[in-house]
Structures are given as structure tokens and as C-alpha cells.
Amino acid sequence: MTEEKPEEVQEEYEATEIVYESYLASAYYALNAVDDIDLEMVSFTDRSRIKAIKRKSLKIIHECISVMHDELFAVS
């Protein structure tokens, strides 16, 4: 029975790591999708959407990196 617990912990860690990686990738792709759009050439509504995408994507990246940093450099 003690052999099952370490495997379960390892699977849980891998699943969490995959979630962070997919969040980071999605946020990165969203930033790249709107990065080259000229804000002067789009409507006010689209400009607001683009700014919101950038703001939210940066926040996702910041949060994921912070969690990953805390996991890597946790004081034991």
C-alpha cells in the first residue's frame, strides 16, 4: 500500500504541471495573435478587446510563473 501513495502523488504533480503548461501556452498564443494588430486601425470596441486580451494573458502568465517558481524554490 505504501507503494501506491508515491505514484498517486507523482500523477497529481504531473497533471498540475500540464495544466500550468497549457495555461502558459494559451496565454502566449493569445498575446501573439493580437500583438501585430495596429490599434489605430481597429474600432474602439476591438481596441478594448485587444487590450483586455493582453492584460488577461499577462496576468495568466504572471500567476502561472509565480506558482511554478514557488514550487521549484519552496523552502523545505
Image (tube, helix red, strand yellow):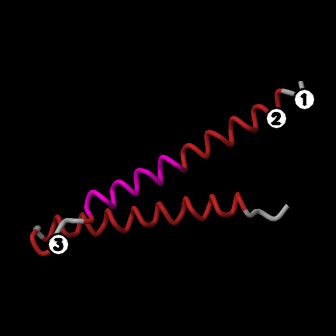
Q: Image point 39% across, 63% down: which residue?
A: 56
Residue drawn at 35 percent across, 54 percent down: 29
- Separation (CA) of disc 2 from disc 3: 51 Å
Q: Position of residue 40 (x, y in %)?
A: 12, 75
**Tag shown at residue 49:** none
Please say whether residue 26 is one of the residues in the magenta stretch: yes
Location of the C terminus (image quadrant): bottom right
Residue identifier under label 2: 6
Return the residue found at the far right: 2
CA–CA distance in space, label 1 to label 3: 58 Å
Tell me which residue sits at (19%, 69%) in the image.
Answer: 47
Q: Is residue 15 left or right of residue 54?
A: right
Q: Does residue 11 appear to the left or right of 51 in the view shown? A: right
C-alpha span from label 1 to label 2? 7 Å
* Mark linked to residue 2: 1
Quadrant position of residue 19: top right
Q: Amino acid at mark 2?
A: Pro
Contact flag, marks 1 and 2 (Cβ < 8 Å): yes
Label 3 environment density (alpha carbons within 10 Å; few <14, some 14–19, many ≥20): some
Which range is magenta?
21-34
- Picture coordinates of residue 50 (x, y %)? 25, 65
Disc 1 residue type (three-letter): Thr
Residue sitting nearer the eye, 56 or 37 = 37
Residue 27 drawn in magenta: yes
